[in-house]
Amino acid sequence: MFDFMDMSYDEPDEPIELGPYIPDAGECMRCGICVSSCPTFRLFRIDEETPRRRIRTISKLLVENLPISADERQHLDNCVQCRACETVCPSRMAYGQLFDQTQAQLNLKASVEHSKIPFAQSLSKGGRDFGMLTKWMVTLAFRLIENKEWLRRLMPLLVVYLKLGLQKPLRRSGLLKKLHLADAEALLGKPALQTLAVSYPANATKRGRVALFTGCIAEHFDRETLLAAINLLNTIGYEVLVPPQQGCCGAIHQHNGQSAAGLIDNNIAVFNALDVDAVLHTATGCGAMLSEYQNDDEAGQLFRQRLYDINEFLLKYWPDGLQLTASELKVAVHEPCSQRNVLKNQQAVYALLQKIPGLSISTLADNHICCGAGGSYMLTHPDNARQLRALKQQVITAASADVVVSGNFGCGAHLNADEHKVEHPLQLLARQLPVSVLV
Ligand code: SF4
Ligand code: SF4
């Protein structure tokens, strides 16, 4: 008998779980299907600015252990991380994950080099040293979004700065530009100073209790959306908890090659400790990150099981008898990349808006092309971000809508810097509630 004809095999003790297949960077077929969906290719029209070429650079770093040139690094860094390429790739290339791994590796190398440059030297003008100063500012910004207490204490100073009209002279001085802070400063709106309450009771007969993810800066800079969310949830019968110990989702850290582990562990511990039916996020950028927390232990699984996008939650638990007041507004829906390409639940927004009688709802053209916000991209790559916003501006103007809605706070702030009227869909919905509950 031939041995190779023996088809018997030992049964494994444990069933083998086959997760989704994630090809490594070396498996890109170079088919080019991803090219036309890439916003940076739209801007530059060169192969170096395509996902295909970036995957090649990533492969050199992660798979082949080869050095990359300064040019390759720059084209890689130009990626907005919109992940539109992932959605069309026949090889199911996990571009977002590969990009984060690459940034982490590059940062590790860079941190060894930068740690040798003293801070005093970074203050000197010109060339690389001035770049170092900007990096110190970025580091400071990272520390601030990690520490909500520091952020809260800074807010009154910001209000004073805005009230005293210091913006104009500071802008004129050119200092903000030199520090690469001009774009960040232009995004500043008047912050809310008070923190949210820990609990908001249900207005109607109580159906349950949920927790609201507010992250790092939304509590101060996107207060209207959070209040709208609380108002809607209370109205449909849910008590809302806002745990003050929660923090930044970690997206900006992770996408810039820094460790988000501490932030992730903290959020999982804070929300898992609550006796709630669901944990809800209102900003799709944070939601995308929260939904991809990789922790595979019991705590990580519990966190993901209870995690919901607020639009989906409201839709699922919308009471039959709740009628919104009518509106004749014309609304265009902007679909953030984090919603289209990661959460993939943009239809929930349209379905919710349809609950407003008379509302005219349209889809913004070119929704598959990133607006340029890209988390911190609008600050780290202001020129590219501005050009992508200008393209979005053209489609917004062509839509001639009364209002544009976007489910991501970052996209809204970036687009509003161009004096558009972009708001979160929850704000629009909450205004149409028949009995508004002030919170
Ligand atoms: S679509 Fe996928 S396989 Fe094709 S070139 Fe782009 S990344 Fe490579
Ligand atoms: S993530 Fe977006 S910007 Fe980056 S390569 Fe893919 S499509 Fe282009």
Image (spheres, rainbow, N blue to C red):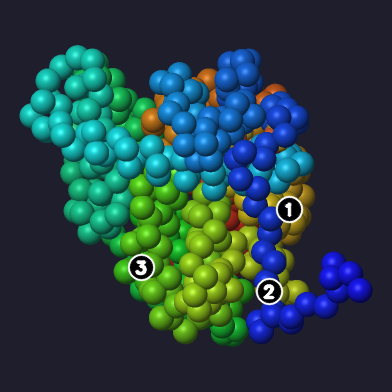
Residue at 40% x, 44% y is 104
| In the image, farthest residue toward the left | 120
Kindly report the distance in space between the C-alpha atoms of the residues bearing marks 3 and 1.
31 Å
- Residue 398 falls left or right of residue 25: right
Q: Earlier in the sequence, mark 3 or mark 1?
A: 3
Q: Which of marks 2 and 1 is nearer the N terminus?
A: 2
x, y percent for residue 232: 57, 66
Mark 2 highlights which residue? 16
Quarter of the image where the N terminus is located: bottom right
Q: Quadrant of residue 28?
A: top right
Element at badge 2? loop
Residue at 43% x, 28% y is 67
Mark 1 highlights which residue? 347
x, y percent for residue 129: 19, 22
- Residue 133 falls left or right of residue 318: left
In this rendered view, identify the residue nearer to me: 41 or 363: 41
Mark 3 highlights which residue? 266
Residue 252 seen in the current view: no
In this rendered view, identify the residue nearer to me: 87 or 360: 87
